[in-house]
Image (cartoon, rainbow, N blue to C red):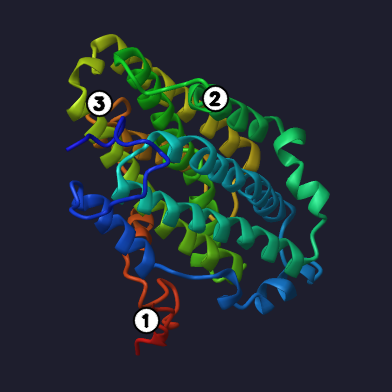
């Protein structure tokens, strides 16, 4: 049987049985079990708090705006990576099925920020241009575009050791750095608000996005590890060091963004703790794809792991039923 890349022509039908990679099917089923849409979440309390004079501090508003600004375009960038580049080069049917599921989830995440901006009455030009007007956001987006550019070359193929290296390099940029590091300072900031019962609607949507991203990360790591296992010649010391260097650069950009979005700290959330969390997260990502930890720091936010790992039957902070199965509520 063919490997996970360089299989049948992309014009062939996806013959998904028999399956070679059951982990891809497992991630697909987890995604289906996590299904949600933003309109499920009430925003009434958020609107009242957002519009109330003195309801939020200027630092809180800055933190929320920066995160809406980054995520609103980052999710679209992620979807473009999937649909226009990665899907074309992953030829295994069950892996492709998961990529289709992930692409749908990215569309839901994009819709989340439309819903939040519309409900709160925010200026879409301000939010959706932050990737150009806020340097710390622009640097993150530019970095990801730069380290995932090989797969966007229309003439690129995954034939040969050098090209497989380039493909894995870009997958690490996409899954490990973009989805695995660049989202996580923002998650910690917004979910810390939710823990204190502030901006609960936006916070709950970020909670659902975090759960989706946990599955995206697991799939991405399994994909990278499978390509390496099937093509061990690519895993040279020099290549591994390049990946480590890219990840460390990503960490520095995320820490810079944390300082920018959270310059003085809010609600007991200190910039130093957020930056330590980013380092902790990066070590987990490195280990997951067979690279050595670089930071060796404790997790300052153990509650973040609880949120990511919690089943969808209950909201972490409330107890609202949100589970859907085969068209009916599972009470």
Q: How crowded is mark 3: few (under 14 residues within 10 Å), some or many (20 or more)?
A: some
Upstream in sequence: badge 3 or badge 1: 3
Closer to the N terminus: mark 2 or mark 1?
2
Secondary structure at badge 1 equals loop
Is residue 81 rendered to the left or right of residue 311? right
Residue positioned 42% across, 84% down in the render: 327
- Sequence order check, earlier mark of 2 and 3: 2
Q: Residue 233 in the image: state x and y as whole percent.
A: 20, 15
Disc 2 and disc 1: Cα gap in Å?
40 Å
* Rendered position, 325 above or below 149: below
Say few, some or many: other residues with alpha carbon within 10 Å of mark 2 (under 14 / 14 to 19 / 20 or more): few
Question: Can residue 300 be seen in this snapshot?
Answer: no
Tell me the SS state at disc 3: loop
Query: Does residue 196 sit above or below 229 in this rendering?
Result: below
Residue drawn at x 31%, y 33% as measured from the top left: 5
- Observer-nearest of 301 and 33: 33
Q: Picture quarter containing residue 141?
A: top right
Q: Residue 326 — which label?
A: 1
Quarter-wise, where is residue 321 in the image?
bottom left
Marks 2/3: CA–CA distance: 30 Å
Q: Is residue 328 above or below residue 87?
A: below
- Residue 154: mark: 2
Residue bearing the label numbered 3: 291
Q: Nearer the viewer, residue 329 or 189?
A: 329
Q: Quadrant of the N terminus?
A: top left
Which residue is pictured at 61% across the width and 74% down the height?
Answer: 39
């Amino acid at each position: 049987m063919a490997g996970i890349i360089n299989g049948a022509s992309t014009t062939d039908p996806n013959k998904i049985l028999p399956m070679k990679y059951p982990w891809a099917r497992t991630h697909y089923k987890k995604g289906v079990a996590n299904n949600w849409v933003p309109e499920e979440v009430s925003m009434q309390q958020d609107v009242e708090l957002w519009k109330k004079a003195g309801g939020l501090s200027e630092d809180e508003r800055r933190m929320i705006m920066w995160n809406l600004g980054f995520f609103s375009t980052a999710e679209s960038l992620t979807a473009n990576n999937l649909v226009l580049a990665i899907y074309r080069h992953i030829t295994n049917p069950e892996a492709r099925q998961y990529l289709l599921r992930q692409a749908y989830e990215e569309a839901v995440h994009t819709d989340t920020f439309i819903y939040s901006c519309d409900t709160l009455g925010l200026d879409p030009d301000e939010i959706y241009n932050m990737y150009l007007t806020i340097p710390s956001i622009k640097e993150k987006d530019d970095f990801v575009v730069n380290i995932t550019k090989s797969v966007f070359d229309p003439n690129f193929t995954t034939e040969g050791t050098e090209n497989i290296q380039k493909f894995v390099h870009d997958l690490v940029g996409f899954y490990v750095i973009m989805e695995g590091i660049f989202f996580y300072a923002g998650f910690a900031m917004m979910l810390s608000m939710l823990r204190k019962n502030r901006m609960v609607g936006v916070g709950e949507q970020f909670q659902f996005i975090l759960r989706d991203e946990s599955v995206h990360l697991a799939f991405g790591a399994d994909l990278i590890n499978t390509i390496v296992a099937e093509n061990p010649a690519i895993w040279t010391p020099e290549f591994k060091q390049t990946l480590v260097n890219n990840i460390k650069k990503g960490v520095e950009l995320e820490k810079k963004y944390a300082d920018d979005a959270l310059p003085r700290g809010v609600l007991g959330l200190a910039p130093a703790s957020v930056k330590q969390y980013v380092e902790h997260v990066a070590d987990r990502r490195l280990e997951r794809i067979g690279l050595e930890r670089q930071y060796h720091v404790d997790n300052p936010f153990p509650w973040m792991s609880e949120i990511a790992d919690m089943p969808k039957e209950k909201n972490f902070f409330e107890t609202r039923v949100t589970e859907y199965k085969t068209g009916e509520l599972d009470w």
